[in-house]
Amino acid sequence: MTITEFKTACSNIEQEYKTKIAAAADLPAVEELRVAALGRKGALTELLKGLKDFSIEDKKTAGPLGNALKASLTAALDEKTAFFAAKQINDELNKTNLDLTLPAFPVAKGHRHPLSVAMDRMTTILSRLGFEWAEGPWVEDEKHNFDMLNIPKHHPARDAQDTFFADTGMLSMVLRTHTSNVQSRYMEKHQPPIRIMAPGRVFRNDSLDATHSPVFHQIEGLYVDKHVSMADLKQDLTAFMQGLFGNKAQIRFRPSFFPFTEPSAEVDVKCVFCQGKGCPVCKGSGWIEMLGSGVVHPNVLKNCGIDPEVYSGYAFGVGVERLAMMMMNINDIRTFYENDVRVLSQF
Ligand code: DAH
């Protein structure tokens, strides 16, 4: 074979196989052609066998020609293979009526418990008002839960009907009945200025009904500094309630009694359901009782080592469930604890 014959053979093979590849009807046909053109006994291999008789000079021309032919045929075969592979997938999809352009199904995600969401909103607002996070133990001694808070031994709040007593043998311990224990815990360790919020779980020996639960949550607020007064309390609680219920939210103070505050006030929020006109939720009064508060009793400051001649403070304790029920329009406290997914997923 001369080099001219080799060149002619190359272009013949290229033409022949390109025509065949173009006409191939399916994937097996393409694979057959791949073997026939490039396989161990294929046309190209046969042709290249003739190379060994060429002069060095001719080999330099023929070698690259052979390589180019191989590359060109491989490319044509690969392209046809890809075409049939895509066609196969398309045919498959057409058979199933699957529309890949449709948006995906939404994935059901878990989310936070409504009580956690409500608690988060409350603590976020309070932290914007400058309150720092504080915590205290659930199992508490009577000293911090009662004595230091000016709740005397014979006070009805200590009654076994309200308090869960935890018999530890040595100390008389209780499950804290309110987050106010964090007041005494914090003040015995810190001097004013103090501005803390203490969210957490509290326990009372109540039976479960629509508005009571033996376990519930409170957020305690405490602000102690020079010249803190009832006016500060009213301003901060107004800001707190407006943060939760919008700028139109209104509060009112009613005289009350707590051993650890003097004066003490019960705080009502204007009913967000009827805007104060009177409805079943507020039992026609237009107001809903929300929390207890007052000016910290001098005895409490003294018990914690803070000089009541120099400092004064206010304190409040919010029932988280009660507020969350109002925020989320829930009328039964048990909703929070039954964990019925059908209910929870609505929040
Ligand atoms: N500890 C009270 C309770 O559980 C709530 C309370 C009232 C907290 C007045 C306070 C306060 O800090 O000043 O019912």
Image: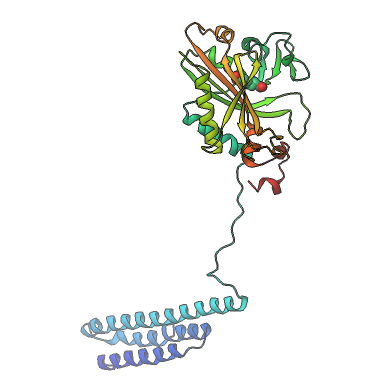
The outermost residue toward the left is 57
How did the renderer colour the structure? Answer: rainbow
Report the residue at 56% width, 38% height from top.
245
Q: Is residue 206 left or right of residue 255?
A: right
Q: Position of residue 91 (x, y in %)?
A: 56, 79
Report the residue at 74% width, 8% height from top.
154
Depth check, front residue: 326 or 138: 326
Depth check, front residue: 108 or 116: 116
Report the residue at 25% width, 83% height from top.
59
Number of marks in picture: 0
Q: Position of residue 41 (x, y in %)?
A: 44, 85
Task: Give the image quarter of residue 153.
Answer: top right
The outermost residue toward the front is 277
Q: Position of residue 161 (x, y in %)?
A: 78, 19
Q: Is residue 19 above or below residue 113?
A: below
Q: Is residue 334 above or below residue 192?
A: below
Q: Is residue 193 visible?
A: yes
Where ligand 1 lies, by image quadrant? top right
Report the residue at 41% width, 91% height from top.
19
